[in-house]
Amino acid sequence: CTLDSEVALRVGGDFFFDPQPGDSPVNLVLIAGGVGINPLFSILLHIADLHGYQEGKGNRHKLGTAKLYYSAKNTSELLFKKNILGLMKAFPEKITCCFHVTQQHSQICKELQPHVTGK
C-alpha cells in the first residue's frame, strides 16, 4: 500500500480467500497474533498451491502478492514458522513475512533474524 491507499480490513469471523480464474489479481496483507495464525496459514498454503499450479500448468489464476505480519511473545510461540519460511523461499517474489516478538529474552536463530522485529 502507499499513502492514501484504500484498504479493507476484516477482524474475526468466517473468512477465506478463494480467487477465481477470471478475477483480477489482489495483493493480500495478512495480520495475525498468536494462535490467530491458523486460518491465515491455511490461506498462505492455498496461495502457494495456486502459485505452484500456475507455474507448473499455466492455470488462469492471476495472483498478486501476500505479506504476512505475525506477532507472538517470542519466537518459540511463532507457530508454523519453519513452514512459513519454506513458503517464502519457494515463492520469494510472491510471499513475504515479518515476524514481531514482544518478550524475546533469548538469542534469535540466524534463519529467523532477517524476518524478526521487536525485543
Image (spheres, rainbow, N blue to C red):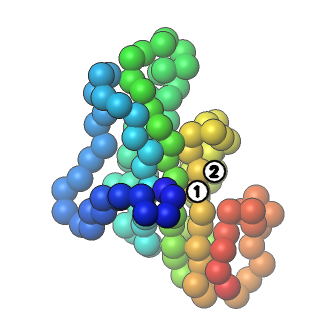
Q: Is residue 74 among what the camera can see?
A: no
On screen, residue 44 above or below 20: below
Q: Nearer the viewer, mark 1 or mark 2?
A: 1
Quadrant position of residue 27: top left
Q: Assess whether mark 2 and mark 1 are in contact (beta carbons under 8 angstroms).
A: yes
Tell me the amino acid under the disc marked 2.
Answer: Leu
Please give the name of the residue rendered at 23% of the width and 53% of the height, measured from the top-left corner: 15
Residue at the spot of label 1? 97
**Residue 12 percent location from the top left of the image:** 24, 66
Q: Nearer the viewer, residue 76 or 11?
A: 11
Quadrant position of residue 36: bottom left
Please give the name of the residue rendered at 42% of the width and 15% of the height, measured from the top-left corner: 59
Find the residue positioned furthest to the right.
110
Tell me the amino acid under the disc marked 1.
Answer: Cys
On screen, residue 6 above or below 34: above
Mark 2 closeness class: few <14, some 14–19, many ≥20 residues within 10 Å:
some
Please give the name of the residue rendered at 28% of the width and 37% of the height, measured from the top-left corner: 18
Residue at the spot of label 2? 85
**Residue 1 percent location from the top left of the image:** 49, 56
Find the residue positioned furthest to the left.
14
The answer to whether 19 appears left or right of 46 in the picture is: left
Q: Nearer the viewer, residue 71 or 109?
A: 71
